[in-house]
Image (cartoon, rainbow, N blue to C red):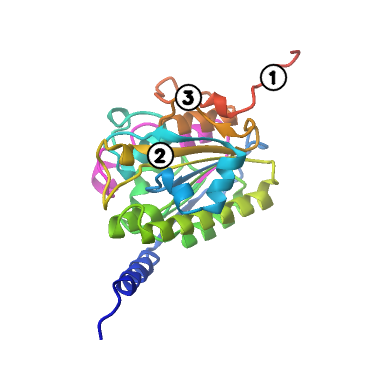
């Protein structure tokens, strides 16, 4: 009996998904109580791996469309070149280019190369007395999470990975138990199924829907932890893709979404300013009242937010 080609693809998809959920977690958590400054400020940075901006409308992603509709957004933000996961996320989290942060490879080499050589936004916020956390879906992010510079992180062991479902479960626990001022979350599906089946195809659309659902669950947990108006979300991606790959300077790989939603965000609308992935770290620190390091290439996206009113004015 010959199986329908779509059924074969579905079987492959399910098998690959099952394999991704088997990775063992590495969990780091500070046990001592650390007082947090500006404890009423909470920022959640969500990166959806491989999400093309045009996929949000193409696949009718309800949560992402809500963020676009209610927030300030750009569908023309740019990532770094080469547009690959680990270097791109390093730039997103450190505010600098690869020649400064030193991450130019795309797999887990912590044992031989160590961790990122400049502080991430999590480490900088932590140094200023804020509580920080990260939950990621790929083991190579270990390069970006130095124990002691983050209050709580969860990452797959080695080069392992898991699904958004597993990530969301950890995020829910972290939000309620830790109430971090800065939380970084990585969701993997669009990149994974873009490589398997092609960007913007049927199963890529399924992966966008999975990520969209995960974002909705994260927002519900954040509402419970902080209250509906108690936090700000910055949602973006590390790169796009085309055919079954990315990494070039092709606009389909370089162009990413950038959305600000929630507390202090200006009235909804499209951002016309130039935005790069390095802008994310600068914007998160600015929202938290943390001085932005002079080394940063990225600058905060001030047009996304209500103006700060100085006392007496």
Task: Determine which residue is flagged by label 3.
Answer: 273
The magenta region covers: 104-133
Q: Is residue 265 above or below residue 154?
A: above
Lateral position of residue 59 relative to residue 253, left or right: right
Q: Quadrant of the N terminus?
A: bottom left
Circle 3 sits in a helix, a strand or a loop, which is it?
loop
Q: Judge by depth and name the residue closer to the eye, 310 or 148.
A: 310
Circle 1 sits in a helix, a strand or a loop, which is it?
loop
Task: Determine which residue is flagged by label 2.
Answer: 256
Q: Is residue 313 above or below residue 192?
A: above
Circles 1 and 2: CB distance less than 8 Å? Answer: no
Dividing the picture into quarters, in which one does residue 130 lie? top right
Task: Determine which residue is flagged by label 1.
Answer: 309
Q: Is residue 257 above or below residue 22?
A: above
Circle 2 sits in a helix, a strand or a loop, which is it?
strand
Dividing the picture into quarters, in which one does residue 265 lie? top right
Lateral position of residue 282 relative to residue 80, left or right: right
How many callouts does the rendering have?
3
């Amino acid at each position: 009996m010959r199986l329908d080609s779509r059924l074969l693809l579905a079987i492959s998809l399910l098998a690959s998904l099952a394999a991704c959920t088997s990775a063992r977690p590495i969990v780091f958590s500070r046990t001592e109580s650390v007082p947090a400054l500006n404890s009423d400020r909470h920022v959640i940075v969500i990166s959806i791996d491989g999400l093309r901006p045009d996929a949000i409308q193409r696949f009718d992603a309800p949560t992402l469309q809500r963020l676009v509709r209610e927030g300030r957004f750009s569908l023309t933000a740019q990532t770094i070149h080469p547009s690959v996961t680990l270097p791109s996320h390093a730039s997103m989290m450190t505010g600098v280019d690869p020649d400064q942060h030193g991450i130019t490879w795309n797999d887990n080499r912590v044992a031989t190369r160590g961790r990122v050589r400049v502080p991430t936004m999590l480490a900088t916020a932590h140094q200023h007395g804020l509580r920080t956390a990260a939950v990621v879906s790929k083991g190579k992010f270990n390069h970006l999470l130095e124990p002691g510079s983050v209050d709580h992180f969860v990452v797959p062991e080695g080069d392992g990975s898991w699904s958004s479902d597993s990530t969301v479960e950890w995020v829910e626990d972290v939000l309620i138990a830790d109430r971090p001022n800065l939380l970084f979350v990585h969701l993997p599906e669009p990149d994974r199924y873009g490589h398997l089946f092609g960007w913007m195809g049927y199963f890529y659309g399924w992966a966008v829907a999975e990520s969209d659902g995960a974002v909705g669950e994260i927002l519900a947990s954040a509402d419970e932890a902080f209250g509906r108006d108690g936090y700000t979300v910055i949602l973006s991606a590390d790169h796009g893709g085309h055919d079954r790959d990315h990494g070039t300077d092709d606009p389909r790989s370089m162009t990413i979404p950038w959305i600000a939603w929630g507390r202090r965000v200006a009235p909804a609308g499209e951002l016309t300013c130039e935005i790069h992935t390095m802008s994310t770290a600068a914007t998160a620190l600015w929202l938290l009242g943390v001085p932005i390091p002079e080394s940063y290439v990225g600058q905060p996206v001030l047009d996304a937010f209500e103006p700060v009113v100085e006392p007496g004015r």
